[in-house]
């Protein structure tokens, strides 16, 4: 076994040596060669979550203003994430049904806003994003999530419609 490994190593080394002898890398292209892995500097950003009471207040105001009676705000939790690399403004999370049954807990949802993108939005755009995330919650509040598109329903269209309704009701 050891002989076989040594033979493979020498064959690989011989092939690498011979290929570079036949096709040497020109000095101009040596700068384009991939850097040594020890030279690559990795960015280390710490991912941090913090409870977002301001988001919870905004969501409760939205739920009082527009009609989404199936959403139990007591089972809705809000967090702000710092250091996430996703391009999204916000995400909604749920606890899988099997864990709900195993742990004997009620369905719950977490709305996470990604500080890097969400905090730069105007107040109106922030409300629209929150409405969008709330629309992922099904009418039976089961812990499942609704997709962006389903039979005859496009979530973004509905989010825009509800946001206009929200704006009309809050401008009085």
Image (tube, grey):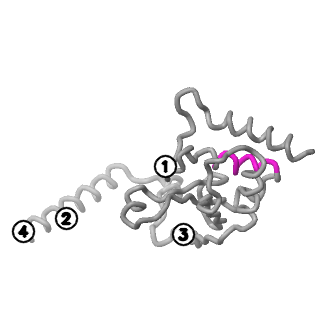
- Whichever of callouts 1 and 2 sits on the residue coming sooner in the sequence is 2
Residue that numbered label 4 is attached to: 1
Residue 95 position within the rendered picture, expressed as x and y whole percent measured from the top left: 47, 59
**Residues at marks 3 and 1 touching, judged by CB atoms closer than 8 Å:** no
Looking at the image, is mark 3 or mark 4 earlier in the sequence? Answer: 4
**Crowdedness near tag 4: few (<14), some (14–19) or many (≥20) residues, C-alpha within 10 Å:** few
Label 3 and label 4: CA atoms lie apart by 38 Å
Residue 8 is inside the magenta segment: no
Choose mark 3 or mark 4, whichever is in front.
Answer: 3
Q: Residue at x 64, y 49 (%)?
A: 134
Mark 2 or mark 3, earlier in chain: 2
Of badges 3 and 1, the one in the foreground is: 1
Marks 4 and 2 sit apart, C-alpha to C-alpha, by 12 Å
Residue 22: x and y in percent read: 32, 50
Q: Which residue is mark 2?
A: 9
Q: Secondary structure at mark 2?
A: helix
Label pair 1/2, CB-CB below 8 angstroms: no
How far, Cα to Cα, is label 4 from label 1?
54 Å
What residue range appears in magenta?
124-133
| Residue pictured at 81% horizontal, 48% vertical | 124
Mark sitting earlier along the chain (4/2): 4
Q: Nearer the viewer, residue 145 or 120?
A: 145
Q: State if disc 3 and disc 2 touch (CB < 8 Å).
A: no
Q: CA distance from mark 1 to mark 2?
A: 53 Å
Residue 46: which numbered mark, if any?
A: none
Residue 144 is tagged as 1
């Amino acid at each position: 076994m050891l002989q076989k490994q040594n033979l493979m190593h020498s064959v690989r080394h011989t092939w690498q040596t011979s290929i570079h002898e036949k096709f040497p890398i020109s000095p101009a292209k040596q700068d384009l060669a991939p850097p040594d892995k020890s030279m690559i500097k990795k960015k280390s950003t710490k991912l941090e979550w913090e409870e977002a009471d301001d988001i919870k207040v905004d969501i409760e105001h939205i739920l009082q203003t527009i009609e989404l009676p199936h959403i139990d705000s007591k089972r809705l939790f809000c967090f702000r994430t710092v250091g996430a690399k996703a391009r999204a403004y916000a995400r909604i999370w749920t606890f899988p049904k099997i864990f709900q049954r195993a742990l004997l807990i009620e369905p719950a949802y977490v709305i996470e806003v990604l500080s890097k993108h969400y905090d730069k939005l105007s107040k109106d755009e922030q409300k629209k994003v929150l409405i969008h995330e709330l629309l992922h919650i099904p009418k039976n509040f089961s812990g499942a999530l609704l997709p962006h598109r389903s039979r005859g329903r496009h979530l973004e269209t509905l989010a825009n419609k509800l946001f206009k309704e929200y704006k009309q009701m809050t401008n009085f």
